[in-house]
Amino acid sequence: MQIEPTEKIWKNGKLIPWKEATVHVLSHGLHYGTGVFEGIRCYSTVKGPAIFRLREHMDRLHKSAKSINMQIPFSVDQLCEAAKETVRENKLDACYIRPISFFGVSGIGVNPIGYPVETFIAAFKLGAYLGDEGMRNGIRVHTSSWHRVTNGSVPATAKACGDYLNSALAIMEAKQNGFDETIMLNELHMVAEGSGENLFLVRDGKIHTPPLNAGILPGITRSSIIELAPGLGYKVEEQNIARSELYLADELFFTGTAAEVTPIREVDRRLVGDGKPGPVTKAIQTAFLDIVKGKDQKYTKWLDPL
Ligand code: PPE
């Protein structure tokens, strides 16, 4: 996705010009993927710009760092304030915020213990991740030939840079085969998630989503959907989903900060339901988009005004 440069990027406590936000070629994180990151959206709400579940995102950044043995030298509160400052200073309204912390330069070798930790926060405008058309009419996906990174080889619940080689391979394969996105299975051949989204399935009026130990990222959008669904009359069951169950689904949808709630209209060249976004997906999508725009009083607790 193309993005327009903004003026400033936050680096280790200071705002610096966009062009100067570069890293040294010998950064450990570049060679070995030893970093953690976040993706956060700021929305234009009825009460001005507000960041959706900012604290939860910065808290997950700290937890991801802990999982890979890294200590970020800024607290969750400091990072929240820094994200707001970055959005404000760039005079942005609705935008996407990308914090990243990684092991920097010291020597060479795989062991990063004692290396400096670099932290950056960028913010820029971002449209619908899977396209406006995809948001309205649904996207086409296939099952990836790449398994999702397994719990036995990396902390699969961490949003760690190195894990995204797996996602990158999976999305490239999907695009090369003419699909919009991909669904990865785990080492037990159960459904895990998309390259950058969690998956939900609707069958006989019930909503299902894979459990956290299926090798998925604990999505903040996912947890928001689990919390808001009962208010719409649906309960979400966290349970394992086999590939063949995808073909029996009445509805499928992806969730994520970037993807928000995106309907899936085709999986492995089979129509999902009648090939149009179903009523449950539409109800969830509408409710979610109302919440992020501050139109639902019950959930203004999830919005952090600038
Ligand atoms: N799974 C993966 C693998 C993932 O990357 C994301 C977010 C999710 C699930 C959903 O998590 P959450 O955003 O907390 O609901 N993917 C981010 C990065 C996408 C990218 O292209 O970069 C995002 O949506 O911001």
Image (spheres, rainbow, N blue to C red):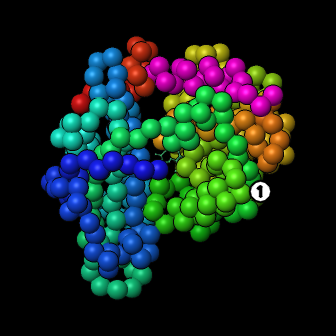
The residue at the point 24 percent across, 30 percent down is 306
The residue at the point 70 percent across, 43 percent down is 140
Mark 1 secondary-structure assignment: loop
Above or below 251: residue 73: below
Query: How packed is label 1: few (under 14 Cα within 10 Å), some, or many (20 or more)?
Result: some
Judging depth in this view, the residue of 166 and 67 nearest the camera is 166
Query: Splitting the image into 4 quarters, where does residue 293 fall?
Result: top left
Is 283 placed left or right of 84 in the picture? right
What number of labels is visible?
1
Magenta span covers which residues? Answer: 274-291
Q: Which residue is mark 1?
A: 189
Above or below 275: residue 161: below
Q: Position of residue 295 (x, y in %)?
A: 42, 15
Amino acid type of the residue tagged 1 in the rendering: His
The residue at the point 39 percent across, 64 percent down is 35
Judging depth in this view, the residue of 40 and 205 nearest the camera is 40
The residue at the point 25 percent across, 39 percent down is 87
Q: Position of residue 150 (x, y in %)?
A: 63, 62
Whether residue 276 appears in magenta in the rendering, the answer is yes
Q: Position of residue 96 (x, y in %)?
A: 37, 42
Q: Position of residue 148 (x, y in %)?
A: 64, 59
Above or below 10: residue 32: below
Judging depth in this view, the residue of 94 and 205 nearest the camera is 94
What secondary structure is the stretch in magenta mostly built from? helix
Above or below 131: residue 22: below
